Amino acid sequence: MPDPPHVRLVNDVAAQFQHRPPDEAAESIANHLRSFWDPRMRAALLAHVQAGGPGLDPLAVRAAGLLGTRTG
Amino acid sequence: MSLLKEPDFGTPARPGEATVALNVDGVPVTVPPGTSVLRAAKHAGIDIPKLCATDSMEAFGSCRLCVVEIDGAKGTPASCTTPVSDGMVVRTQTEKVARLRRGVMELYISDHPLDCLTCSANGDCELQDMAGVTGLREVRYGSGVDAGANHLDAPTDSSNPYFDFDASKCIVCSRCVRACDEVQGTLALTIDGRGFDSKVAAGADVPFMDSDCVSCGACVQACPTATLQEKSVVELGMPTRSVITTCAYCGVGCSFKAELRGDELVRMVPYKDGGANEGHSCVKGRFAFGYATHPDRVLEPMIRDSIADEWRAVSWDEAIGFTARRLREIQAEHGPGSIGGITSSRCTNEEVYVVQKMVRAAFGNNNVDTCARVCHSPTGYGLKQTFGTSAGTQDFRSVAEADVIVVIGANPTDGHPVFASRMKRRLREGAALIVIDPRRIDLVRTPHIEAAHHLALAPGTNVAVVNALAHVVVTEGLADTEFVAGRCEGFEEWAAFIAGPEHSPEAVAEITGVSAEELRAAARLYAGARNGAIYYGLGVTEHSQGSTMVMGMANLAMATGNIGRDGVGVNPLRGQNNVQGSCDMGSFPHELPGYRHVSDESVRDIYSQLWGVPIGEEPGLRIPNMFDAALDGSFRALYVQGEDIAQSDPNSRHVHAALAAMDLVVVQDLFLNETAKFAHVLLPGTSFLEKDGTFTNAERRINRVRPVMAARTGKQEWQIVAEIAQAMGYPMHYDSAAQIMDEVALTTPTFAGVSFAHLDEVGSVQWPCNDAAPDGTPIMHVDGFTRGRGRFVQTTYVPTRERSTRRFPLILTTGRILSQYNVGAQTRRTANVAWHPEDVLDLHPHDAEVRGINEGDTVTLSSRVGETSLRAVITDRMPVGVCYTTFHHPVTGANVVTTENSDWATNCPEYKVTAVQVSLAVAPTTRAAAADQVPVAGA
C-alpha cells in the first residue's frame, strides 16, 4: 500500500533538511508547507499525525506540530 | 500592410563607435572600423549591386557585381570584402564598373533558365533585380542551350517536405552553403566540384532529406534565386503582405514575418529585427504551421453530460452557460475549493492572466497552476531563493561574450535550435564548452565544435556534481572573493559546508560516474574564465532535487562572480513558448502576478480593490495535488487551458483516473486531445496565427503576437474566459487584449512600462520594464540582486528514491527532439512527421545485446507503474544502463511508465529518472487500445 500523497510529499521535504539541526529543520519544513501547500493538504497531514503518523519522517511530525503557528 | 522587405546591408555590422569617415559618390558617411565599403554605401543610401553578399553572413567576394572604384586604389575591388578607411573616396557608378557588372550578369544569365514569367521567384529574385539594375540588355553568348555547355538540365531535389532545390537555377553564389555554416552552424552543404562543374551539394551529394540538413530554412532564406524555394510559394505564389508576429513553439520566441496572399498564409520568414532570433529560424517555426488549418481543428464548442456520451456541438452561449452552471453547482455541493484551473504556456500572457483572474476572482480560490509546474517550476523556486526572482539573467545575445559555456541538462540543438546556433557560433570562435548530461548530445562533438569536458553523470546525481564543482572552486581558492564580499550573503557558512570532504570530486565519483580528475578540470575551466555562462534545461529541473540543483548552479555562478554582465549568468532554456510569461502572469497557486506571494496582504489588496473581491491568502492546489484531491473526492472540476495533461503529465494511469473521477473537465484547445477524452466541455481555441497578445520568451523578452487571420472559432480565448466568469456572476469584461496588458502593467511593478503601443513602437522589451528601466532589462542583477544580496543556499545532495533494481535495472530519461514539440499536438499535424513518425527508445549497444534486442525491434518498456511498447534504436550516445525516449506520440504514451516522484520543493515531476526494464516484445503492447478504454465515472 503506497503512502498517501501528503505523507510522501512531506517526507520528500523533510529529507532535504536532515542535515540541519532538528529545531531549525522542523521550522523550515513547516514554513515550506505554509508557503506552498493547500490548507486541505496540511489538514490531511495533521489528521495523519493525530492518527499516529505511520510512515512519517520524524522531522515531518515535528514540523506538523508547528503548523498552528506562523513564523518567517 | 504590404510585403515587408528588411534592408540588406550586404555585410554584417561591426561593433564599436562610428569613427571612420569616408565619401561614397559624394555622400559623406561615418561607420565603425572594419565595416565594408558595401555596407558603408548602404548607410549612405547607395545600393551597390550584389549577389553573393548579404548581411547575415561574412563577405565572400565571389560574384564580382559589387566592384567599385576607390581613389588611389588600383583596379576595381569588391566592395563587400574591402574595409573602409578614413578619408576613402568611393565611386560606385562609373562606366568602368558598369561595364564589368554587365559582363558578369551576361555570364550568369547565359546559364540560367529564362522562365522568369513562370518562375516561382518572379518578383522576388535578386538575379532578376540585378539584371535590371546593371542595365543588361543583351547576352552575347546566347542563352540556354544556345550558349553551349550549361546546367539547365540539372535535376530538382524535392525530397524535403518544405522546400525544393532546383539546381538548374543555381548561380553557385555559395550563400546557401555559407548560411548553413555561419548562421545555422550545421555545415550540411558544400560546393562540390571545381570550375564549371561546381555545384551545391547536400552532404556527400545526397538528397537533402538524406543529408545532415536540419531544415532550418537558412539556405532558403539566403538563396537569391528560385533555386531553394518553399514548396508553398511554388504552389500558392508569391505573398503580397506581411504581419510580424512571434513563433508559438519553444521558449526562444523567434520573431517571424507571416507572409500572406490575401488571407492565405504562404510562408513564415524569420524577422531580421527580432531580438531573440535576428533573422534565423528552425524547422518548426519556419515551416510547421500547417496544424493551424488542419482538418482536425475543432471550430465549434461541444458539450456532453457524461464522458461516455457522444459530443454535441452547441452555440457559444450554450457552452459558456453550461460550463458556468456546472462550476457553480459543483461549488455549491462540494465547496468553493472544489474547482480550479490550469493555464497554458502555449497561450498568450493576456489569455493566461484572465484564467488566473477567473480562478481567483470568480472561482474564489487559488487553485490555479500552469503547465510550467511540470517543467520549470524549480527554476522559479531556486532563482527566487538565491537571486530574488524567477528569471534567466541574460539576453540571448550575451552568449557571444561567453568564454566558457556550461550546458547542463539541456540539448539546445534539438530543444532550442535557434539559440543553439548563436551558441555554436561562439563555440566556433573559440569559447570552451562543458556539457553535463548523461547522453552524448550533439553539442558534445559536432562540426567544428568539441566539448572540452563531457561530464556524463548518472541520472539523478546533478546536485552531487554541482556541489563537487563548487567544492573545487572553494577549496582551490578560485572563488571571486571581491564579488562575493560586495554582492552576496551567506558565503562563509556555505563555503564551510561545500568544502566538506563529502563534496569532493573524489568522494562523489562513485555515485556520479564522473571521474574526479575531469570534474576538477571542468571546475577550473569555468572558474578561470573571463566570462562563464551556465545554460540549463529540464535535465536540471525534472528531478527530485530540481530546485536544489537550480540553487546549486546559482551558488556556483555567484561564487565565481559570473553574474551581472554580458557573457555570464544562469539561464534557463524554457521549454514552451510562453513558460516565462505564464509564470509571470500569476499562474502559480501561491503567487499573484509578478511572483508575489498570496500571503502578502499589500499585494492582495491591489487585486482585491481592483477586482472587487477578496483574494485568498492561502496557496491553492498544484497540478499533481489536484489529481490527488480528485481521487480523494475534494476536487471535482478542472478548467484546462491549452494543455494535454493526459499525455504530458507523469504516471498516465494516475492522471487518467483523476480526470475520470471529476464531475466536470473543461478543455480549451485546438484539437480533441487526449485530455478531451475525459472532458465534458470542449471550448475551441485559437492558433497563434489568430491570437492578439504577447508571449514572453526565456530571456524575459515580451514580444507581440499579432493576428494573421481572423479567429476561426469566432472568439478570442480571453473572451471565452471573461464570458464564463460573467456567466458565473463575476463581472469581467475587456474590449481588447491590449486592455488586459494594461491591467497587468497597472498591477505588476516589473511590467509597469509595458503596453501594446510601446511594444509596437520598440519591437520588444525585456522585463523589468518600468520607470527605472523604460527600455527594459537585457541583463539582470547588474548592480545588485533583485533581493538585494545574492544568497548562498546549502544544497545537500539527497539521492532520489527511484533506484534501479533487479526487476527494473535500467534508468529511463525522457525529452524531446528537433522536429517535434511537446505532446506533438501541433507538429504531428504537419509534415514534420517525416522526421519522427513515432517515438523510439534509444538504448546502449550493451544493454541491447544482453537482451537480444536488435535495431528496430519492438520492445516493451516497463516500470513499476505501467508499460508501453516502441521500437528500439541502438546508439552509443546512451551510457550503459540508461535509455531515452520522447513523449511526442500518444500511441506510445511514454508517460505511462513515468512515476509520481517529484521535486521536493515544487512537485515538478521527476521525468528524468524512472527505473525500467526493456525486453523484446512478444507482440505490441496494448497502450493504444488502453487509451481508448477511458474509465467512465464522474458523469
Image (cartoon, coloured by chain):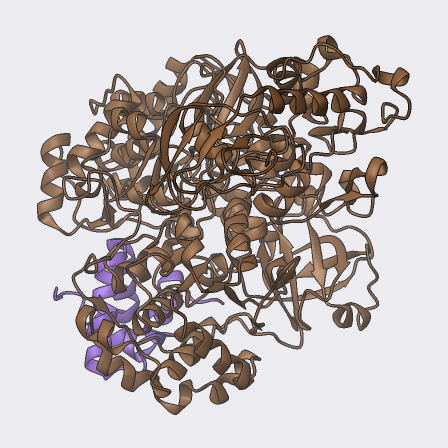
Chain colours: A purple, B brown
**Which residue appears farthest toward the front when viewing the image?**
B72
| Residue at left offset 84%, top offset 68% | B852
Q: Which residue is drawn at 24% across and 49% down?
A: B595
Quadrant containing the N terminus of chain B in the rendered view: top left
The answer to whether residue B610 is left or right of residue B114 is left
x, y percent for residue B740: 25, 27
Rendered location of residue B698, percent (x, y): 40, 47
Asked if residue B499 is positioned above or below residue B366 in the image, the reply reads below
Q: Would residue B226 be visible to someone looking at this image?
A: no
Residue B564 lies, with reference to residue B35, above or below; the image says below
Task: Say which of B881 and B332 sits in front.
Answer: B881
When asked about the image quadrant of residue B329, the answer is top left
Q: Is residue B361 left or right of residue B30?
A: left
For residue B753, say whether it is visible.
yes
Q: Which of B401 and B932 is in front in this view?
A: B401
Q: Which of B100 and B928 is in front in this view?
A: B100
Residue B281 rendering spot, x and y as whole percentages = 55, 38
Q: Position of residue B460 (x, y in %)?
A: 51, 71
